[in-house]
Amino acid sequence: MRNLRRRLVPALLLLACILLTVPAFASDGGEAVSSMYATFWALVPPIVAIVLALITKEAYSSLFIGVLVGALFQCNFAPVDTLDTIINDGLVSAIEGNAGIFLFLVLLGIIVALVNASGGSAAFGRWAERNIKTRVGAALATFVLGILIFIDDYFNCLTVGSVMRPVTDGHKISRPKLAYLIDATAAPVCMIAPVSSWAAAVSGVAADLDTGISGIELFIQAIPYNFYSLLTFVFIIALCVMKFDYGPMAAYEQKALKDGELAALPGSDTEEGNKNGRVMDLIIPVVILFILCTVGMIYVGGFFGVDAWGGTDFAGDFIGSFGNTDAFIGLPWGGLVALVLIVVYVVARRVLTFKEAMACVPKGFIAMVPPITILTLAVSLKNMTSALGADVFVGAAMEGASKGLYSLLPAVIFIVACLLAFASGTSWGTFGILIPIVVSVFEPSSTLLTIGISACLAGAVCGDHCSPISDTTIMASAGAQCDHVTHVSTQLPYAITVAAVSFVSFIVAGFVQNAVICLVFGAALTVGVLFVLRQRENEKSA
């Protein structure tokens, strides 16, 4: 396997160099048009990146090769055009389009460095040792905090990770397990919270469609049928209470428990910091950050009568301003103000001097370089996939599927959404493509429309949860300070288990059309599957 990994990447790079010498063909001497547009080939670049990442256990080169393959396809293998596409349409466009979230990442990294240096994280870890007695308690506390921070998935991942790392480290929970707990509560909780950036995005997509109700009403009606999100919570609670793991995660958890090997990134262990630090030196910065990020998002959305998009229609309307906001602007807005106030707080508390506080600025930036790099490459890959017409191909496939299997269509929609989100790494892009198609398939007043929308949203979350190129997955790795590919490979069996149960639940829902019955069935099936898996693990270890 090691020899295969060593030979595979150079071989693919050599193949890419050879392909770069192939001339492009343009019709009538005009601009070259990709012959792979809106075909299955549009999904090949992310598939190449994902497979390489899982084989080589290395994200940077795998993502770059995926970008290279996408650019080759887009430019019909023309060398100069391919290089131009990689740089301008890929990397530069990714940096420009995500500058706001990059800024928020840096700001949050600085805040985490400040909290660590002030001794707040270490003090919280000591408090947790006295009050959270068991590994189960530590895991469930992480889960609960993830549920409570439902405003935005990026904010969820990074905040829960920075707060809970001292707790889970103290109870010898591996970083891959922490990353899974973060990732499994970030997007799923945002997808069932009416007040979140995700609810705003769904409402915006559905706002102009002929459904007879508003976008936010459609979102709320879909919540009880969002089986993947809801059953993920059942899965986490049952897994923690039953005290077992399976798949690659089991090996990491055994090493953490027996040998104390947490599989943390180098230099990511919690710093002791100032010995005079208190728990409040962590809680107060987190509360400041949470409040100001929320204020930043509704400010950008026009809550205070200053609408970033030119109007004041949402003055005083909390939900409406969330529907009108842009998290890429609101989060940096809140993060920057929070950082200034936190610096003032730690200096006033005399746990850090001003010079020591400023020394945390480069530390925070350096800590966020890996996720920023991976996110840049992942977004570049998404740009290549979009330019190749992946959305057109999937949309046509969905319309073809809608001609038959009417009651089974929610289950089909779920699978299609899973695959599209997995390949593209974006749940927002997925439901943006599929929601209009789902609305056109079902009667506006039918329960199947609600179930179909739920299947679309659940599948988008599931694929996003599984995908190595998903920004939320990348954020979860950053929050847990865990190797990204390790996080993906360890959580994949867990996500697939819940996805399988959700698929069966959507089949049942297509015929039963009762949310309570279907949820009870899905929860019972989830717990039953875990009992079977635990029995198999016990037999292996016997």
Image: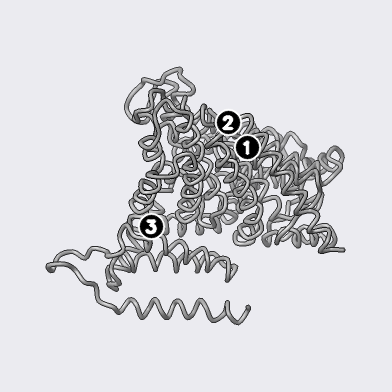
Q: In the rendered image, which quarter is residue 148 located in?
A: top right
Q: Position of residue 293 (x, y in %)?
A: 54, 33
Question: Is residue 509 or residue 238 the one in the foreground?
Answer: 509
Q: Quadrant of residue 428?
A: top left
1 vs 3, front mark: 1
What is the C-alpha distance between the residues marked 3 and 2?
32 Å
Q: Is residue 461 visible?
A: yes
Q: Which residue is mark 3?
A: 385
Q: What is the total number of numbered labels drawn onto the structure image?
A: 3
Q: What amino acid is labelled 3 in the image? A: Thr
On-image quarter of the C terminus: bottom right
Say left or right for 244 vs 394.
right
Residue at the (51%, 63%) spot, across then down: 50
Q: Position of residue 540 (x, y in %)?
A: 81, 64
Could you tell me which secondary element the residue under label 2 belongs to?
Answer: helix
Image point 49% across, 22% down: which residue? Answer: 318
Using the image, determine if residue 467 lies above or below residue 235.
Answer: below
Q: Which residue is mark 2?
A: 224
Which sits in the foreground, 292 or 88?
Answer: 88
- Residue 296: which disc? none
Residue found at the far top of this picture: 316
Choose between 241 and 393: the one closer to the eye: 393
Quickly name the residue at label 1.
230
